[in-house]
Image (cartoon, rainbow, N blue to C red):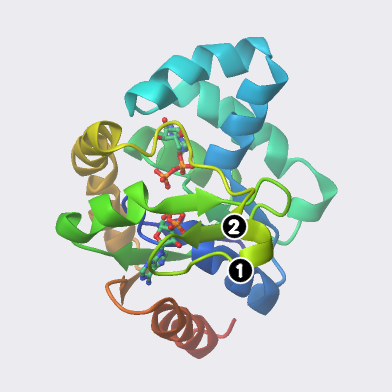
Amino acid sequence: MSGSIVLFGPPGAGKGTQASRISSLTGKPQVSTGDMLRAAVASGSEMGSEAQSYMEAGLLVPDEVIIGLISERLQEPDAMSGLLLDGYPRTIAQAEALAKVEGVSAVISIEVPDEAIVERIVGRRMDPETGMIYHIRFNPPPSEVSSRVVQRKDDTEETVRNRLSAYHEQTAPLAGWYEERGVLIRIDGNRSIEEVGSAIEAAITSRGN
Ligand code: ADP
Ligand code: ADP
């Protein structure tokens, strides 16, 4: 498949969890705007400090900041045959900006009802050494890792409500936008990690990888 693939869905849908499998399948490097923003916050850059207040409040970072970040990433040599975009675009303005510079061959929409999202987000843990994503109940870390896993600052019940509102108001309309362009693939994300991964793999393979 030429062009980029977009992983789309609400916070906690399983985009990051599925990304490495899809990246291995397609050979496209995974690029997560959330990870890029967290790295910018940790580095203390000007852009990071601007983004931090939005992220901690569960709001989307302004389009111009994100569009600038991705435009630079698309110029790296490994982006030549497309990227696996995890969490970008999240607004119509971002999708329009992307469409000007990059073809999108598939948008994988991982669909999970709001009721399931809160438990997924609140139980999410991250291994700071490997970047692996775990869940205290659904995907517990192995014992040698469990003492070092961390919880993201924005993974609280209060913040997740704001993130879900931002999703429904600003991001969900993008599904229709991509459906009109014939690239949307809907995947039922309310199943086991393995079942969701197989469904995505089957959908990508049937489209000619
Ligand atoms: P996203 O990148 O879409 O925000 P993540 O991949 O980080 O989502 O997953 C959110 C949380 O839900 C993590 O704790 C992850 O382990 C868990 N998770 C992911 N997929 C599933 C699934 N199919 N069933 C149950 N829990 C899942
Ligand atoms: P999740 O998948 O759990 O929502 P992410 O790691 O993708 O988490 O994003 C974390 C936060 O980073 C978002 O709540 C938002 O503040 C910011 N962010 C990430 N990607 C974007 C984007 N494309 N546009 C605007 N803000 C973004």
- Asked if the residue at label 2 sits under 8 Å from ligand 1, the reply is no
Q: Position of residue 8 (x, y in %)?
A: 39, 56
Where is residue 83 drawn, in percent x and y? 64, 56
Q: Quadrant of residue 166?
A: top left
182 vs 116, nearest the viewer: 116
Q: Which residue is drawn at the image coordinates 40% and 23% (left, top)?
A: 56
Eyeballing the image, is 11 above or below 47? below
Give the residue number, with chain letter if any, for mark 1.
Answer: 142
* CB under 8 Å between discs 1 and 2: yes
Can residue 124 be spotted in the picture? yes
Depicted 152 relative to depicted 123: above or below: above
Residue under label 2, please give it.
Answer: 146
> As rendered, which of 116 and 202 lies closer to the eye?
116
Secondary structure found at label 2: helix
Amino acid under disc 2: Ser
Q: Position of residue 16 (x, y in %)?
A: 52, 58
Residue 2 can be seen, yes or no? no
Q: Quadrant of the C terminus?
A: bottom right
Quadrant containing ligand 1: bottom left
